[in-house]
Each structure stands twice: as structure tokens, then as C-alpha cells.
Amino acid sequence: MDRVDSVLLPELDGPVPATLPSTLGLLSLALGVGALVAPGRLARLTGVDDSAAARGVIPAVGLRELGSAVGLLSGRRPAGWAWSRVAGDAMDLTLLGRALADRGGERRRRLALTTAAIAGIAAVDVLAAVRIRRAQRARARMIRMDVGVTVNRSPAEAYRFWRDVENLPRFMAHLESVRADDLRRSHWIARGPAGHRVEWDAEIIDDQPNKSITWRSLPGTRVPNVGRVQFVPAPGDRGTEVRVELRYAPPAGTLGRAVAKLFGEEPEQQVRDDLRRFKQVLETGEVVRSEGSPNGISVRQQAMQRPAQPLPASRR
Amino acid sequence: MKATAWMGTDTVKVIDVPDPKIMNARDAIVRICTTAICGSDLHLYHGYIPAMRKGDILGHEFMGEVVEVGPQVRNLKPGDRVVVPFPISCGHCSSCQRGLYSVCENSNPNAGIAEKIMGHSPAGIFGYSHLLGGYAGGQAEYARVPFADVGPVKVPDEVRDDQAVMLADVFPTGYMGAEMCDIKPGQVIAVWGAGPVGLFAAASARLLGAERVIVIDRFPYRLRLAEEHLGAETINYEQADVLDTLNEMTAGRGPDACIDAVGLEGHHGNAAMYAYDRAKQATRVETERPFALRQAILACRSGGVISVVGAYGGFVDKFPMGAFMNRSLIMRTGQCHVQRYTRPLLERIQRGEIDPSFVVSHRMPLRDAPKGYKIFQKKQDDCTKVLLTV
């Protein structure tokens, strides 16, 4: 994971603290160790000390908890292990229900308390498992693009053009407009297929003149995104290596599908095209147009070329 | 306006299309006076270049009169008589600034397609498929010329249209073919192909000081042009074994440099050899018939130069890499960086060192373009070069 990812991830994880899986793991560890080391005390505490079977079941439950603990603390597939805790909770509740049925008095009271406690833990486990899975899916949907182009201009010229964020729609094909609200904040409008428009506010979070610019969408954006562009002198006096890292996290559902479609099957290709246009604008003054590609470089247009003959008057 | 359009394999038509208009600030609109059919147009005609669309306007050799310029074009004005180089070149990218105009980094809006086939994209070219930009060509009454502040060169009154139009492609391409040979006094240069590019390569080899020039082709009328106009020696590969003859002519050394001015649709004296590559090409197992290139590599003296200006589009089979590597050969190649050569060659024409119109065999009005393609394709009526006048 690089620095650009780490800007976006806390937002994708939402209200799930990154420590949630390991907290659940520690809980499993404590329960597991308790059940294995002091099964008798646990049996008394929960009101099943009158059962011979309980002496066998409690260490087995302990072993299961230790298994969940190892899984959750390992950090691998946290959602799966969180669901394993939910399954364990269900199993425990079933056992407790059967134990409750044929007991009375103090033991029944203790069993009822235990059942209530386990039910509470189960609710927390379900909530945690759902949230961990949701955060994982958001991370999996994140579109990552790392693309570079060499521009025959100095880092200062390339930086200046990019730093004026209102220039971005001149070469980023999916953007309809960018309005600078002040030196750091700006309002972006992107156009998508089928009339979908996505708007968001962004801010520059790191600005190193002539070297790099990092920006991100403000929290609450429907399509959280972050980007960084670096301007590195190209070796051999060949201008500037412009290196761009972009991360988008489209939401699930219709909007997410629209955003995914916007970037097509080859999201990097679109960014590469954007950078080609950036190079054209900086080196030649504008986006280069041909009769077959009257809008200039675009993956979609490449697939749907019009014949190489002048445009009818209606299309000018 | 009227324009020559590609309508499918072996079919061109003169059709009515809208007049071109300025699309970029550095564009000019040129009213075409004279345009030519190039041998490489035949590759399009035969359907060997991918990414053609029905209705594409052909033609990358044209000259005429400027009728309109975009706001950023300050070196030209309406009324100027210009010849337009076939590569479209921005003049500001690293490649253009190093004189490598035909690999301009900005002029192909369809660079993404070209990269998939060629790794990186070359420049856009007028009327030469969507792979190379999807630009409308110049076999028409008018053409839009992008980067008009870089490419077009004004033609002085004393240089005729039929001389100037040769500067769009064939003369500079032949000249670059000879220049890449790095000719030293006393050297023997062999040229495969006696079409206009091969003839200009032979003529340029002479201009650059070659001792002897040997031209290889199968059409006697073309070989006669090489002998009579250029003082070249010739080999008809249908009548003689090329390798044996070249060895004999050079006392076993082989030519010092070999120029391939044939490209992807070569022919071979041996019918079986021709059939082998023709069949592979027809089934798209290979895209080229590289007979001239293979033979040039085997013929060349050890340590010599193979200069490739014939057009290739894709992949060749049976490339004699062993001969190439073991005998320290050098290969230089490229679509011509025409903008480098237009002015110096124009001066050679003005000084009377060469009259490039010697290659012209046919002149006809634009409306007869389909006939021109047919005659040129079939090599009928001793056809070498067809000019279309508008």
C-alpha cells in the first residue's frame, strides 16, 4: 500500500475501526483460555456445573474460541473469521437454550444471565462482521491507476498548468468542469454515461511547487477519490516525467456501476489518454483532432471511428 | 468537394464530401492543384493496412494553394503555393525537435491503437488509415493541413507543380534511403525496387557520391528509366539470379549498402517462394512478403548497411537473423522525416541538379482516380507514377 492509498482507506473503512478484528480476537482469546484453564469455574459461573457433559463441552468451546482468536489476530480474511464468531455464538445459544429447559432456581438465573450476555456479544459480532465485509468490498472496488508521460516542458511549466485546477477539464476527458473556490478547495463535475453526473468538492492536501500536488475529495463524497501528480525532471534534458496516481472508490449499486462504466474495462487506458492530451496541450497548445477522431484522443472514439473525411457542418 | 475515398479492398471512388474546415488553431486549408498516387496507397488499396474505414479519403502526396489559415499559423497566408509533407508533425515534441518528424509524439489521436501493434505510436499520416490518425487525405479538391506552421513549404514560381509534389513523399523518402547508407567514395549501392522511391533512392545515391548504383526490379520499362535517367546498372530478377549477379558485379564483396524500396508486397522470381509467402499473407499468418528485405540482407557486404524505406505494416517471417547478426550488418529504417529534406531538396531542384518529374508516367484529372489506381496496380501502360490534377 502506498501513500496515496492510505489517504483514501480510512474513509472507505467507514465507522469500522481498523482495530475491530483484533479486538474481537482478544475477546475470543480471553474466553478460550478461560474455558481451557478453568472449565469448572466457568461451569459454576454459567450454572451448568451439575452436568457431566458440560465438563466435555466447555473445553471444546474453548478450543473453538482459540481457533477464532488465531484467525482474527492473524489479520487474514478478517470478515470470514468474524462470521466464524457469529457461528460460534449461534452454537453457544443453542446449547444454552437446551440447558435452560431442564433447570430451575439459581442455576436457571445464571443460565439466563449467560444467555443474555452471549446474545449481546452475538449482536456485536454480527454488526462487526457486516461492517468488516462492507469495508473490504469498498476496498476491492477501489480503482487504482498509475500512469506516466514524458512532456517536453520544464517541471515548473507542467506544474503551473496542473496547479490551475480549472485547466484539468482541458485534458481529462471525463470532467465537465472544475471550479477553484479558493487556493485549496475546488468543485468538480464529471459526466458519466446515461446522463449520470457526479459532483464533488476536493481539496489540495499537499502542494510542493514544481514537484508534486496531492488532492482528495472532501469526506462525504459519493465517489471518494484521491490523486497525486509528480513532476520529475526527465533524464537527458528531455523535459518532465509526469507521474499520476489516482484512486477512486465507487460505491456499490447503480452509481458504482455508472462510475465503473465511465472508466471502462481499461481504466488506466483512459488516464493514459488524459496524459497524452495533457502532453498535446502543453507541447502543441491544444488537443490534436483528426477527421476520424474529431474530439481528439479517446478510447471510446478509437473503437467508433467516423470515416476520415471532413465533418458535416452540423457537427462543427 | 470531390474526394477519392477507399470503399473496400480494390475499390476507390470519387465521392462528394463536405469541404474541410479549420479544427485546430495551427491548421491551414489547402486547395489542391496536384496530388499523386503512392505505391504505399496500393497497400491500402489491397487491404494490407489495418484500420481502414469505408469512406476514408486517401492521398498523402499533394501540393496546392493555401486558402485559409488558423489563428496560430503566421508563416503562411492565403495565396501561398505550398507542398505538404506526408507525416503530420507538431514540431515541438522531443522527436520533432531531434528531426524525427515521422515519429511525432502528438499527431496521432489514435495512438492507443498504434501502440497495441507497434509498441509506441508513430506520427499521424494524411489518408493512411485510422491506425495512423484517421486524417482525411489529399486526393481531393481541398485538404485540412494540421500543424501548418511546421510542415508545408512554399514553392517558388520556377518550380513546377509536378516537381514540387514529389517533395511530399517519394523524393525525400528515396533520398533518406540513400542518406541512411552513409555513402563513402567508391561505394556500390544496390536498390531493390524501381518504383518512384527506388528510382529516387538510386538518384540520391548518385547525388551523395556512390561509385556505382545497381537497381533490381522485374519491369523492363522501369529498369530502363534507371539506366537511361540515372546511369544505373540493372538486374531483372525474373531473368537472373540476384545474389549471383551482385557477387559477380562486385567481385564477391556484395554491395556496400542495400536499399529496400519494395516493402510489404514484394514479388519473387521463384514462383514457389512467392506462393509460400503470398499464402501466409492471405491467411494473415504473416502480414508482409519480405522478399526484397531477405535478399538484401544476404546480398550485402559484411559490415554493410541495410536501409529500409519500403513500407511495412506488421510482421515478417523467415527473417535471416543469422546472416544479419554474424556478418555485422546494420539496419536503418523509418518513414521519411520529410520536413528535414523538403527545403534542401527544393534547392537541388532549383539548382537543376535533378528534375524529379522524370518518374511521372501518367497525368489525369482527379475524377479519374479509380482508373489511376487500376493502371498503377496492374502496372499497365508502363505506369510508374500517376499524378491527379484538380
Image: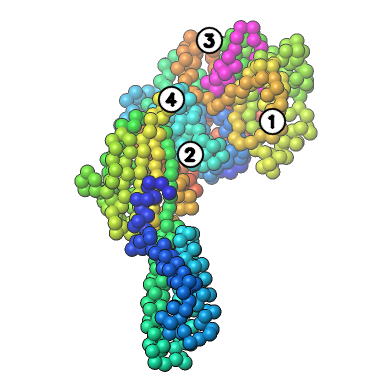
Q: Are marks 1 and 4 in contact (CB under 8 Å)?
A: no
| 3D distance between C-alphas at marks 4 and 3 | 40 Å
SS label for mark 1: loop
Look at label 3 and name its amino acid: Glu
| 3D distance between C-alphas at marks 4 and 2 | 24 Å
Residue that numbered label 2 is attached to: B111
Please check whether the numbered discs 2 and 1 fall on a single chain.
Answer: yes
Residue that numbered label 4 is attached to: A236
Residue that numbered label 1 is attached to: B319
Residue that numbered label 3 is attached to: B353
Q: Are marks 2 and 1 in contact (CB under 8 Å)?
A: no
Question: x%, y% of residue B367?
Answer: 52, 35
Tell which of A230 and A190 is nearer to you. Answer: A230
| 3D distance between C-alphas at marks 1 and 3 | 38 Å
Look at label 4 and name its amino acid: Gly
Tell which of B235 and B105 is nearer to you. Answer: B105
Name the N-terminal-most of marks 1 and 3.
1
SS label for mark 4: loop
Q: Label 4 is found on which chain of the structure?
A: A
What segment carries the magenta color?
Answer: B171-192
